[in-house]
């Protein structure tokens, strides 16, 4: 059993979304550390170098510059060190096809992005309590 605090990793290339999720965690006083990344490459490097804490959850945007959220999800699921970490897709897309692809590739949930900090607070509270308590 690890004594390191559990962390939540969030990958999004939109600064507003990074700020919204960071504000949500701060406003709610969520005890898990939040690590944010602008690209999948940054996330994978942090994981491999042990700089991402002890992740209990990874939240991915679907439409990222460089590696897409689905490509990152594929990489995580193929790596024995990260294959068991729950991954949630948080995206502006709500098409059935995107949702189906994400779930079939191993995402545990798919959530459309909200339009307010209050919406992000609801999502942050739900995800932290389900996956990181």
Image (tube, rainbow, N blue to C red):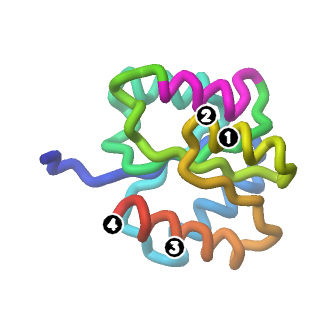
Q: CA distance from mark 2 to mark 1?
A: 5 Å
Q: Which residue is mark 2?
A: 105
Q: CA distance from mark 4 to mark 2?
A: 25 Å
SS for dot 3? helix
Name the foreground residue: 92 vs 32.
92
Viewer-proximal residue among 84 and 9: 84
Viewer-side label of 4, 1: 1
Total tally of numbered discs in the picture: 4
The tag on residue 125 is 3
| Figure quadrant of residue 104 | top right
Q: Nearer the viewer, mark 2 or mark 3?
A: 2
- Rendered image: mark on residue 53: none
Residue 91, percent from left and from top: 76, 50
* Residue 93 higher or lower than 131, as above or below: above
Front one among 91 and 23? 91
- The crowd level at tag 3 (other Cα within 10 Å; few <14, some 14-19, many 20+) is some
The CA span between labels 2 and 3 is 25 Å
Please rate how many residues cluster around mark 4, counting C-alpha atoms within 10 Å: few if below 14, some from 14 to 19, many from 20: few
Mark 2 crowdedness (10 Å alpha carbons): few <14, some 14-19, many ≥20 = few
Locate residue 93 relative to residue 46 in the image: left or right: right
Q: Which residue is mark 4?
A: 133
| Cα–Cα span, label 4 and label 3 | 11 Å
User: Which residue carries the number 1 mark?
Assistant: 102
Q: CA distance from mark 4 to mark 1?
A: 24 Å
Q: Which residues are magenta?
A: 66-77
4 or 1: tag closer to the N-terminus: 1
- The kind of secondary structure element at disc 2 is loop
Report helix, strand or loop for mark 4: loop
Q: Nearer the viewer, mark 1 or mark 3?
A: 1
């Amino acid at each position: 059993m690890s004594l390191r605090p559990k962390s939540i990793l969030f990958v999004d290339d939109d600064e507003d979304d990074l700020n919204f999720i960071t504000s949500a965690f701060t406003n709610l006083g969520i005890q898990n550390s939040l690590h944010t990344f602008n690209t999948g490459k940054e996330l994978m490097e942090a994981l491999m170098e042990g700089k991402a804490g002890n992740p209990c959850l990874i939240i991915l945007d679907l439409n990222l510059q460089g590696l897409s959220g689905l490509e990152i999800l594929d990489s995580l699921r193929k790596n024995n060190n990260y294959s068991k970490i729950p991954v949630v897709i948080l995206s502006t897309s709500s098409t059935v096809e995107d949702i189906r692809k994400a779930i079939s590739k191993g995402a545990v949930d798919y959530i459309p992005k909200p339009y307010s900090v209050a919406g992000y607070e609801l999502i942050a509270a739900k995800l932290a309590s389900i996956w990181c308590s």
